[in-house]
Amino acid sequence: MVQMKRSRRRFLAAAIFMAATPAQADLTARYMNPQGLVGMSVEVDEKGNMRVTQGNQLAVLTIGGVSYLLTSDLSGTYAVRQDDWVAVNAKRFRGAVAAMSPKMGKPALPDEGPKFDIVAGKTETVGGRLGTTWSLRTHGTTSPTGFDFVINTDPDLAAVGRAIAAQMGGSAAGLAAMRGTVSDFAAKIQTIFEKGTVIKMSGLLQLESVKQGPIPKSEFELPPVVLTREQFEARTDGAAH
């Protein structure tokens, strides 16, 4: 009897939680550039799949936790896993550095660069959403670097924020694989993006609209051609020289 009562309480608690937690709806956020054109769109479906599209040249599609770069060349559109893209380009970068080193008399790898501080600023409304300005300052100075981001923490935009932060993280991983280390600059921007949803990026992009509603399933489908690491390396070998 005691066990039955406990089970009922657990069931009731779960039911209340589910009733209080709305289902994740498809969400589309559009960001405009200073020219008034769509510079980036972020789409998230009810399953948590994400698509970040920049212009009409490149998209990052995350399905089941795996991220792919979608792009095209003269032979058509294709996809490649983001980690394969990173591995191939890191290999090329290291090869280029090795080729330059004998001529320079020392390794040509860049150093880690300067350190930066994250500074909170005023609040600002962008695209009808309120956010806090976070800026990068060169460590130990008060001089502006020009890298300012407005971050919103509304729960209904959280999925968009995660999508952008994930893309930023992938870019940082790519730089780390090529350089051997993540620059403090990239690491600090990643930290800012993980604070919420960026609604303004250093005057380059700003949130224009947020729309809830069904997104065509085709937006979260891979193209017919998905390259392996070896196929991607072979296909882009000429473009790398």
Image (spheres, helix red, strand yellow):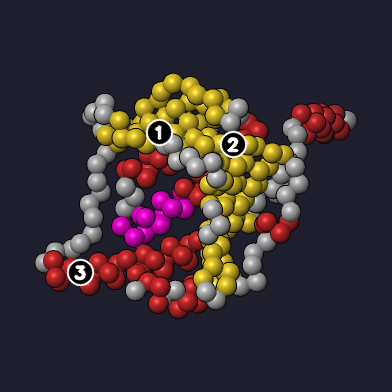
Quarter of the view holding residue 4: top right
Q: Secondary structure at mark 1?
A: strand
Whole-angstrom CA distance, mark 2 to mark 3, is 45 Å
Q: Disc 1 residue type?
A: Asp
In front of the other: 85 or 54: 54
Residue 178 within the segment the image draws in magenta: yes
Residue lying at the far left in this picture: please name it: 105
Which one is nearer the viewer's eye here, 172 or 223? 223
| Quarter of the rendering occupied by the C terminus | bottom left
Image point 24% across, 46% down: which residue? 113
Q: Are marks 2 and 1 in contact (CB under 8 Å)?
A: no
Nearest to N terminus: mark 2 or mark 1: 1
Q: Residue at x 60, y 27 (%)?
A: 128
Q: Quadrant of the N terminus?
A: top right
Q: Is residue 195 magenta?
A: no
Magenta part, dominant SS = helix
Q: Which amino acid, mark 3?
A: Met
Residues in magenta?
169-179
Residue 27: image x %, image y %? Answer: 68, 42
Residue 20 point in image, percent of width and height: 76, 29
Mark drawn on residue 208: 2
Occupied quadrant, residue 134:
top left
Label 3: which secondary element: helix
Q: Secondary structure at mark 2?
A: strand
> Label for residue 100?
3
The label shown at residue 27 is none
Q: Please name the residue that numbered disc 1 is placed on.
A: 148
Residue 237 at x, y percent in the picture: 41, 76
